[in-house]
Image: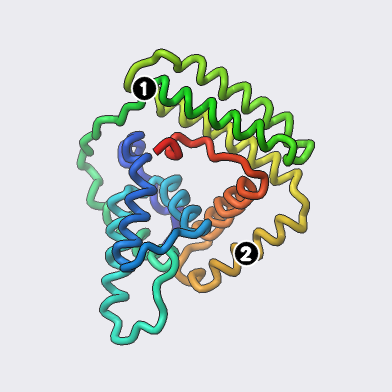
């Protein structure tokens, strides 16, 4: 089963409101089914991003988690706890394919988009710019120009949002922030020593090892990419720019 075989329309991918809810609801469902408030790992958060970027609806992820745990609970012997969302990967993809087939020829109702005021978003962007500025001295020389341009763009965006009421144009803003993040990731990948990148990949391989048989090659590749991005941000003390992190 492959992520490339699952292609949802923009309507199925959901609105900004669903984007904000996606991560928290997945985390809460996994913790509730596991029975303990286990903190999600870098790998887990990267996997959620992989599902979100693939356009897998939240309902499919929650259904997949439930089905994986239902199967686990039915086992006569439970010598090991479920310690990662990767345990649920196959069931999530199966649920997504089932939902896609059921949705063929059926129009989806569009939920109303959530609204933040322009001022709220402006404050968030200003704060992100300040965090990047604070991290500037720790960045590789090649990354500093991109970081400084990002700060300037964040301030420009913040100024344009000041005074805007509810229902600011968040979808377009999120796309711009995504482009900025991708530029930062690209320059950090090129400027980070090979030894550090190898260490990050080794960490990811170790965490993924018990679950590789449950994931497709496409999903593993995307998950490795997401994991590397997250670890680079942690390494250089850079913030995520996505509006999800406002919540």
**Few, some or many C-alpha atoms within 10 Å of disc 2 (few <14, some 14-19, many ≥20)?**
some
Residue drawn at x 34%, y 62% is: 31
- Nearest the viewer among 200 and 190 is 200
Residue drawn at x 53%, y 60% is: 220
Q: Position of residue 189 (x, y in %)?
A: 70, 46
- Nearest the viewer among 205 and 102 is 205
The numbered dot on residue 55 is: none
Q: Secondary structure at mark 1?
A: loop
Position of the C terminus, as image quadrant, is top left
Q: Is residue 116 visible?
A: yes
- The structure's colour scheme is rainbow
Q: Is residue 32 above or below residue 137?
A: below
**Which residue is under mark 2?**
203
Q: Secondary structure at mark 2?
A: helix
Residue drawn at x 64%, y 41% is: 185
Q: Is residue 117 above or below residue 73?
A: above
Q: Residue furthest bottom?
A: 77
Position of the N terminus, as image quadrant, is bottom left
Q: Position of residue 90 (x, y in %)?
A: 39, 65
């Amino acid at each position: 089963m492959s992520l490339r075989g699952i292609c949802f329309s923009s309507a199925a991918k959901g609105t900004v409101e669903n984007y904000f809810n996606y991560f928290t609801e997945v985390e809460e469902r996994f913790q509730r089914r596991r029975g303990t408030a286990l903190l999600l790992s870098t790998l887990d958060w990267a996997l959620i991003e992989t599902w979100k970027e693939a356009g897998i609806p939240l309902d499919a992820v929650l259904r997949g988690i439930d089905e994986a745990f239902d199967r686990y609970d039915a086992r006569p012997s439970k010598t090991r706890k479920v310690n990662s969302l990767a345990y649920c990967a196959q069931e999530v993809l199966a649920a997504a394919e089932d939902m896609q087939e059921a949705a063929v020829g059926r129009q989806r109702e569009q939920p109303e988009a959530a609204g933040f005021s322009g001022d709220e978003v402006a404050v968030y962007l200003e704060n992100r710019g300040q965090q990047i500025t604070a991290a500037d001295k720790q960045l590789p020389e090649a990354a500093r120009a991109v970081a400084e341009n990002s700060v300037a763009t964040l301030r420009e965006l913040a100024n344009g949002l000041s005074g805007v009421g509810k229902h600011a144009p968040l979808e377009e803003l999120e796309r711009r922030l995504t482009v900025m993040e991708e530029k930062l990731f690209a320059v950090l990948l090129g400027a980070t020593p090979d030894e550090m990148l190898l260490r990050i990949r080794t960490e990811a391989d170790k965490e993924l090892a018990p679950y590789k048989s449950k994931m497709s090659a496409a999903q593993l590749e995307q998950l490795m990419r997401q994991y590397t991005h997250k670890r680079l941000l942690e390494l250089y003390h850079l913030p995520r720019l996505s509006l999800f992190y406002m919540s």
